[in-house]
């Protein structure tokens, strides 16, 4: 098990190095987040909507912006591997699909989480919302949503990678599967913004955890099949 | 696995790419210590056979026998390296995964020391081929599969390759090498067995440890089929 995890660690450090060298995904996510937030901020300016109203639509706007900004990056997680078919070098070295998958989910989760928190801050400023008292709860929702999204993004990115239309195919494949995550995230954010706490007995926290578990189990078991010819 | 079954090879394998049958009912078994020259015209199925043997592709029918998963060195038309990592970073990554640390030795042996800190994508084709060869030789794999290894190498690079493969044959009696090539002139001397492929089938097989006249017979058959 230690050797297995050591390889996952090596792959994570490789993913970080590749992302840091190119900074493509992080820049793409940040730009998408900022553009979306600015457009939403302009469209819902105080001249049109009052603070109470923007508070009610803030969760929905946050989640639309989060899902849209991440959808555009879905096919990116696999592009480093396709160049020179480096992933086949890993398979030849005895690396399993599960190890590759977990390393990519780890780095994807971290980037999506940063994107989520950036959106929270920028949208809160743009819509004049006071969220400081619930930022920890929001971060927890963002963390579990990011892991679910990354679990899905990594496998969808690999499935779509052989298509010339992968930029379109990946979001199309992912969108129906994202609805439970979208609803759970929006509902929990609404509870936080309007009532200051999440109802842990409600269905939404459980749904978020179930979505995480399902995507992760499917991804770990299917990734090897997907990446081999 | 039964004792009489080969530990590395294919049995009745068929493979179709798109609508084109590439391998048709091929059966070949390879034994330890062999250095097999795989000859065939373009499209004969050499690369597809090597990918199947390496475990990177699945057969449509038949069986691929591989007792060495995760311990195969494979040089392909693809580099199997990360273009945005340096030569050293790539070799360090693949060495660490394989549990061996001999990066300096690899860099030195393949003449890559001056390019150790160059991104693989920025290397010349020849140096990319050397880096890919260095990766293939990591951990002294018991099975080495080389697909057109001399296509981008200069004379010095080819000599290094020939020396390495010859050393495997001499020093490691159990090491198996399978080389798909058209370059009989420079790599032919390595062969202990020659297999000719044509249109996805075995045209001729000299058999293991064949005498030189038998090796030459298969080479001649391959040349005739190419005319």
Image (tube, grey):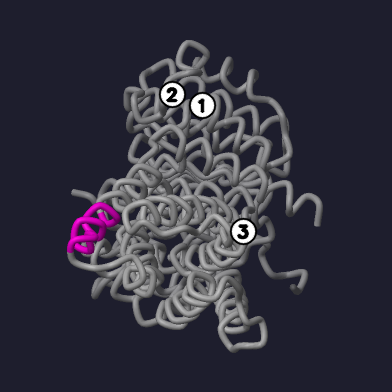
Task: Judge whether B156 appears above or below A197 on screen.
Answer: above
Instruction: Give the secondary structure at mark 1.
Output: helix
Left/right of residue B174 with respect to residue A57 in the rendered view: right
**Are dots 2 and 1 in contact, CB under 8 Å?**
yes
Q: Nearer the viewer, mark 1 or mark 3?
A: 3
**Are dots 1 and 3 in contact, CB under 8 Å?**
no
B187 or B219: nearer the viewer: B187
Left/right of residue B185 with respect to residue A100 in the rendered view: left
Q: Residues within 10 Å of mark 3 (few under 14, many from 20)?
A: few
Q: What residue is pinned by disc 2? A: B158
State how far apart marks 2 and 3 are (Cα). Answer: 61 Å
Instruction: Give the secondary structure at mark 2.
Output: helix
Q: Where is residue A180? Give x, y as percent.
A: 46, 83
Q: What residue is pinned by disc 3? A: A136
Q: Where is residue B12? Give x, y as percent.
A: 49, 75
Residue B201 visible? The answer is: no
Q: What residue is pinned by disc 1? A: B162
The stretch drawn in magenta includes residue B141: no
B198 or A145: nearer the viewer: A145
């Amino acid at each position: 098990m230690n050797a297995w995890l050591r390889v996952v660690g090596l792959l994570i450090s490789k993913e970080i190095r590749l992302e840091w060298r190119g900074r493509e995904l992080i820049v793409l996510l940040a730009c998408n987040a900022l553009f979306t937030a600015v457009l939403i901020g302009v469209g819902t300016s105080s001249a049109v909507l009052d603070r109470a109203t923007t508070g009610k639509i803030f969760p929905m706007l946050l989640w639309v912006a989060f899902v849209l900004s991440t959808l555009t990056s879905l096919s990116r997680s696999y592009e480093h591997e396709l160049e020179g078919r480096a992933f086949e070098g890993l398979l030849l070295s005895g690396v399993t699909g599960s190890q590759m998958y977990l390393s990519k989910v780890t780095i994807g989760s971290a980037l999506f989480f940063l994107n989520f928190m950036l959106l929270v801050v920028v949208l809160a400023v743009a819509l004049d919302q006071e969220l400081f008292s619930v930022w920890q709860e929001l971060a927890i929702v963002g963390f579990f949503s990011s892991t679910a999204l990354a679990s899905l993004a990594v496998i969808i990115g690999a499935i779509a990678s052989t298509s010339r239309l992968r930029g379109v195919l990946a979001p199309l494949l992912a969108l129906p599967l994202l609805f439970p995550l979208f609803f759970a995230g929006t509902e929990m954010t609404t509870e936080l913004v309007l009532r200051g706490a999440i109802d842990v007995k409600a269905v939404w926290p459980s749904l978020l955890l179930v979505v995480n578990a399902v995507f992760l189990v499917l991804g770990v078991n299917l990734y090897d099949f997907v990446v081999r010819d | 696995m039964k004792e009489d079954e080969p530990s590395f090879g294919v049995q009745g394998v068929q493979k179709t790419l798109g609508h084109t049958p590439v391998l048709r009912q091929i059966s070949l078994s390879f034994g330890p210590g062999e250095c097999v020259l795989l000859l065939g015209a373009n499209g004969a199925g050499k690369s597809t056979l090597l990918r199947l043997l390496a475990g990177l592709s699945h057969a449509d029918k038949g069986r691929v026998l591989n007792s060495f998963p995760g311990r195969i060195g494979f040089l392909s038309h693809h580099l199997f390296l990360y273009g945005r990592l340096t030569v050293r970073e790539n070799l360090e990554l693949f060495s660490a995964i394989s549990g061996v640390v001999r990066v300096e030795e690899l860099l030195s042996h393949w003449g890559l020391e001056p390019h150790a800190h160059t991104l693989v994508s920025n290397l010349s084709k020849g140096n990319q081929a050397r880096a890919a060869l260095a990766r293939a030789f990591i951990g002294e794999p018991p099975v080495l599969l080389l697909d057109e290894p001399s296509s981008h190498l200069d004379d010095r690079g080819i000599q290094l390759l020939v020396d390495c493969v010859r050393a495997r044959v001499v020093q490691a009696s159990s090491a198996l090498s399978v080389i798909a090539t058209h370059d009989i002139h420079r790599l032919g001397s390595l062969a202990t067995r020659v297999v000719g492929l044509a249109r996805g089938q075995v045209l001729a097989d000299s058999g293991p440890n064949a005498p030189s006249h038998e090796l030459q017979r298969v080479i001649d058959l391959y040349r005739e089929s190419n005319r």
